Image: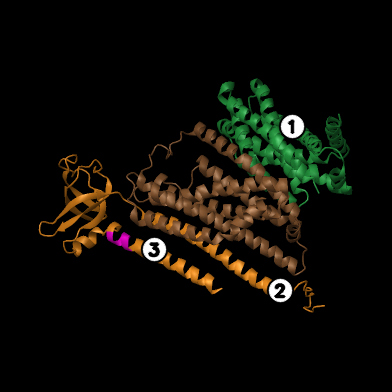
Chain colours: A orange, B green, C brown
Amino acid sequence: MTGLYTRWALILGVTLLLAILTFQHYQQHLATLPMGTLLSSPPSSQPVRIQGMVKSGTLQGEVEQGQATFEFVDGPASLVVEYEGPPLENIRELKTLVLIGRWDSQNQVFKAQETALINNFGFVAAAYLVSVLGLGWMVFAMSQRVMVLFKEIKESKLYEPEADSLGYKE
Amino acid sequence: MPFFKTIRWVVWKDLISEWRTRETMSSMLFFALIVILVFSFSFSMDQDAARQLIAGIIWVAFTFTGIIGLGKSFTSELQNDCLESLQMSPAPKGAIYLGKTAANFLFMLSVEILLFPLFVLFFNLDVIEAVGTLLIIFFLATLGLSAVGTLFSALTVQIRAREVMLPVLLLPLAVPVMIAAVEATRGALSGDPFSFYSQWIQLLTIFDIIFTVVSFWLFEFILDS
Amino acid sequence: MINRIIRQIQRYKGWFGGGAALCIFLGLYTGLLASPPDYYQGELVRIMYVHVPLAHTSTLAYSVLFGGSIWYLWKRDPLVDNMCQASASICALFTALALITGSIWAKPTWNTWWTWDPRLVSFTVLLLILGGYLMLRRLVDDPVRGGRYAAILAIVGGIDLPIIKFSVEWWRTLHQPMSFSTRGVSISEDILIPLTLMSIGCWLLFAYMVMVRTQILYLTELLHAKKGRLLSQTHFSQTTP
């Protein structure tokens, strides 16, 4: 009986550990900073990720060569971006994307070195949660049922007469 | 040949009892009429919309009507314990299945042939050139429905909630028949050349062959007690 | 014969459960953390690492149900009948989860929760057939007859499912071209490792779950028999060869 619960505590622990690791990974490598926060309270020179759209008519420079400047808009906020990095084909006008780089507060310029695709992490999390919770709960309920059945079989007597409607036994 | 004799007697028995009571055919016909009326009220259609939807409407009406007939096919055997005599009879069970399937097929096909002129009348269809191919399609699709349906009619007759379980079990399995029948009927009604929809007729033929054989084999396990 | 094989394997079911847990944890780790995002799909490819194994496993479960049903009609082994019932309910769970995760993947990718894709339709029909199967088992009073009827339904459904998939494929190509296809995308090694781990994990988990569920069904019958409510045919027929 205790064996079952120890085993499941272990499984739950490993699952939680994986969930925490994933969340940390998301925080460090995948979460984007809102552009307003970046402008009002710029972080010290760590690289950050921001999401936005390339404003139409502002894209200049050679994207294929890996150099471009453009205005980047996210709702009401906007800033000037200088991109310098690997050559890309996916910077276009009106394209929504994620930029990775540093905010240069003296020149009021965002120096981007990398781009990334937009992702909706809610869908990934939902899919994993549904399947892991669904399967885990089902297996747990089944193992518990086996335990209960074993106990009941051990306790029940052979050919026990059934109680009648008033609860008396023969 | 006792095998073919059994088939003939089962069909004959069903036809005679139907002739004396006229229960199955009349309930199927009235139900189908109501379905047609409900459809024509709920889609107030012009000619073009009718042409698009009519194939689906025809087959929904035919399938639900068919299910009524199929359900009656074995519940009528419950009276006077006829089902048990069928189970105990030394006749080959496969022959009983084929006889029942043939009887159901005849009921469904005759109801469909009686109803189709009403569809033509109510929805202003232009069918004179397509009558031949439509008959082939009706024949094949009805055969498929009654082949699977007779098996499940016999299966559901001895369980609780049999009126619900027959459509619940039968309709998912009849998806290929429905798709193929609707597509072929639509092709025939819109005057496409035969080669456009001949693949659906092939699919219906394959379905009929497979499921007549499979149900013929499996029927033995239903009447086995 | 197969009765004895099932009993032999049942003894090692702990190993199946442990192996499943190990593979799934490794798969989750590589799938969520260690593997890079896909070039085309980005991070959404991670949904595939749960969706594809679930879908594979539900087809595996239906094959077990199909084979077991044929065997049951042939040999009338009550243990095989219990195994069929067990794999049907687990197949329903896996199919439902595969449909839900597939729908979650479809929303950001195709911008719709639902489309009449052949695979989606055939999985939905599979779920409907399994629902009918489980309902049928509850509605028959005599368990022996219930097992036989359910086996018949499973066999007819198993033969029908490929035809359904085939006909829906034709029907789709007729009405609109198959724009949604993932066949053209080549599978790289980064995707393959978590996918393989999760698939093996799901198969082992399925085997484990079927064993536990079969055990539950057997124990329930044993309990009924012991209480004298029902002289279970399962219990008694297993004591005589």
Specify the subunit that label 1 lies on: B
Q: Kindly give the residue lying farthest to the left in the view shown.
A: A106
Q: Which residues are magenta?
A: A24-28
Of the residues tagged 3 and 1, which is closer to the observer? Answer: 3
Between circles 2 and 3, the one closer to the viewer is 2
Q: Nearer the viewer, residue C241 or C137?
A: C241
Q: Amino acid at mark 2?
A: Ser
| Residue type marked 3 | Ala
Find residue C87 and report its horizontal and vertical position in percent: 60, 53
Chain for disc number 3: A
Q: Which residue is mark 3?
A: A19
State which chain disc 2 sits on.
Answer: A
Residue C236 higher or lower than B163, as above or below? below
Asked whether residue B33 is in view, the answer is no
Spot occupied by residue B17 in the image (x, y as percentages of width and height):
87, 38
Which mark, residue A156? 2
Q: Residues within 10 Å of mark 3 (few under 14, many from 20)?
A: some
The residue carrying pointer 2 sits among few (fewer than 14), some (14 to 19) or many (20 or more) residues within 10 Å by Cα, namely: few
Residue type for callout 1? Leu
What residue sits right under mark 1 in the picture?
B109
